Amino acid sequence: MEKKVKDFFSARNIAFLAVLVALVVVLQLWGSVIPIGAGGLNLSFVLVPITLGAIILGPIGGLILGFIFGFVVLMTGVTGTNFFTAYVLNDSPFFTVITVLLKGMVAGGVAGILYKVVSKKNKYVAVFVASATVPILNTGIFILGALCMSGSINTFVSSYMPDFDGKNIIYIVIVGLVTVNFFIELAINLICAPALYTVDNVIEKQLVKKYKKNKINNEPQKEEN
């Protein structure tokens, strides 16, 4: 286990992780000011770098990026940037913090594990499995967390979503809060993550090829006897 952690924190992985962390922060903050759907929820373009991290860096990378995602979401709630998060965080702080942190971390970590397992058979299938896993788990855990906060959700709905007032809590959460967002996020992830992974693969292969070529050219030639 210690060796795996040590191997993860290589110069290449740290550089790649830093870029993905920056993307997670920027995309989540950008998404927070462009709400879509009911209740002021936002599209998670941020799921794309989390998926890439899970694929390229493995479960640890996915876990770290999922945590960063959750932390930024909580900060948008604390600062009031995301109105829905701010409301439930104030009304049900414990379940909000647990749900927000857990959904990103589980999604990223499990996607990394599934990619490792499936890639032994087929790498391209593994990429799509990981790309689908992240939005499915992210949304699934959000739904479970929202059901645990049913009182807060019902109060929010009665105040800000009158069309859903009086509806069953499961109907409110699934239809009112996540349906549109989930399918759009799933489509974005299934298109963008595999495409960016392919680009990264091509670039990395070219860099390796160039490095090997330069190494051969720079090697001192043996003098003939």
Image (cartoon, rainbow, N blue to C red):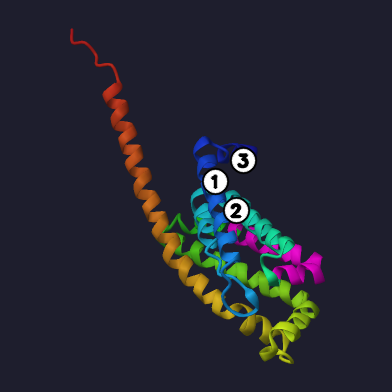
Mark nearer the viewer, 3 or 1: 1
The Cα–Cα distance between marks 1 and 2, rounded to whole angstroms, is: 8 Å
- Mark 2 lies on residue: 65
What crowding class fits label 1: few (fewer than 14 Cα within 10 Å), some (14-19), or many (20 or more)? many
The answer to whether 155 appears left or right of 161 in the picture is: right
At label 1, which amino acid type do we have? Leu
Identified at 75% across, 86% down, the residue is 158
Q: Where does the magenta region start and end?
A: 85-109
The answer to whether 200 appears left or right of 180 in the picture is: left
At label 3, which amino acid type do we have? Val
Of callouts 3 and 1, the N-terminal one:
3
Mark 1 element type = helix
Identified at 48% across, 66% down, the residue is 189
> Any magenta on residue 86?
yes
Between 4 and 64, which is closer to the camera in this rendering? 64
Callout 1 touching callout 2 (CB < 8 Å): yes
Which secondary structure type mostly characterizes the magenta part of the structure? helix
What crowding class fits label 3: few (fewer than 14 Cα within 10 Å), some (14-19), or many (20 or more)? few
The Cα–Cα distance between marks 3 and 2, rounded to whole angstroms, is: 16 Å
The C terminus sits in image quarter: top left
Mark 3 element type = helix
> Any magenta on residue 38?
no
Of callouts 3 and 2, the N-terminal one:
3
- Mark 3 lies on residue: 5
The N terminus sits in image quarter: top right
**Horizontal and vertical percent position of residue 173:** 67, 81
